[in-house]
Image (cartoon, rainbow, N blue to C red):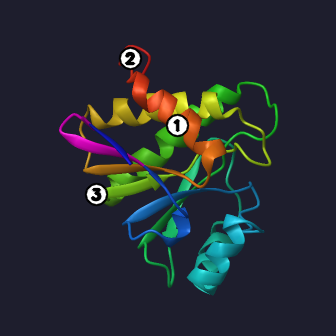
Amino acid sequence: MEERKIGGRVVRLIRGDITDLEVEAFVFDITADLKLGSGYGGAIAQRGGPAVQKELDAAGHLPVGEALITTAGNMKASFIVHVNGPKFHEPDTEGKLRRAVSNALALAKEKGIREIAFPPIGTGLYQVPLDLCARVLMEEISGHLAGDTTLERVLLVALDSREWAPLVAQFSKGVSHAAA
């Protein structure tokens, strides 16, 4: 576990299954049609129960770079912040990723959330480079925590060593607030 303070708040890097953490909220990268699908989506559907998909169905659609919040149903978390991050090699991958992370952080602030967990966004099936994702996460989170926010703790959650190494490398570098 790695930890640092930014603006008097804690950013912690951990390994684990984000859907099984005892946190107030966690972020999930979802497609525009708001269907939970397989992988983490399947875990959310199974562990959270039908309430999560029901709220997503009511919302209907989520443009790339946007975020919305739902209950976490029967899960240990209270909320899920769903983001529609960039897919494959879309134009402006970095900008879309920044908007998704920034919108997730803004929603957390709006809801008064004190603790949120972020996975690498779009780095599996959607092939967003892990190095890019780690850098954008650290820059956006650092910039947010240096300002006015309700967040007290942000967790960056790696499932495996493939995700862990780039997050640790970026975490170790620190962040240039000029880039945030």
Residue at the spot 29% in from the left edge and 58% down from the top edge = 112
In whole angstroms, how far apart are the C-alphas of marks 1 and 3?
A: 22 Å
Left or right of 72, for residue 154? left
Q: Is disc 1 surrounded by few (<14), some (14 to 19) or many (20+) residues within 10 Å?
A: many
* Secondary element type, mark 2: loop
Residue 121 location (% of width, % of height): 62, 45
Magenta region, main secondary structure: strand
Circles 2 and 1 in contact, beta carbons < 8 Å: no
Label 1 element class: helix
Q: Which comes before the other along the chain, label 2 or label 1?
A: 1
Q: Position of residue 34 (x, y in %)?
A: 71, 63
Q: Quadrant of residue 25?
A: bottom left
Displayed quadrant of residue 11: top left
Q: Which residue is mark 1?
A: 167
Amino acid beneath label 2: Ser
The residue positioned 57% from the left and 33% from the top of the image is: 166
Q: Please name whichever residue, 103 or 6, is drawn nearer the observer in this view of the structure.
A: 6
Q: Which residue is the site of mark 2?
A: 176
For the residue marked with disc 3, what is the amino acid?
Arg
Whether tag 1 and tag 3 are in contact, CB under 8 A, the answer is: no
State the extent of the magenta-drawn residues as a range: 5-13
| Residue on which disc 3 sits | 114
**Foreground: disc 1 or disc 3:** 1
Q: Nearer the viewer, residue 159 or 152?
A: 159
Q: Residues within 10 Å of mark 2 (few under 14, many from 20)?
A: few
Q: Is residue 53 visible?
A: no
Tell me the quadrant of the picture where the C terminus can be found.
Answer: top left
Is 74 placed left or right of 112 in the picture? right
Which of pointers 1 and 3 lies earlier in the amino acid sequence?
Answer: 3
Left or right of 158 on screen, residue 41: right
Any magenta on residue 51? no
Kindly identify the residue that appears in the image at 68 percent across and 57 percent down.
30
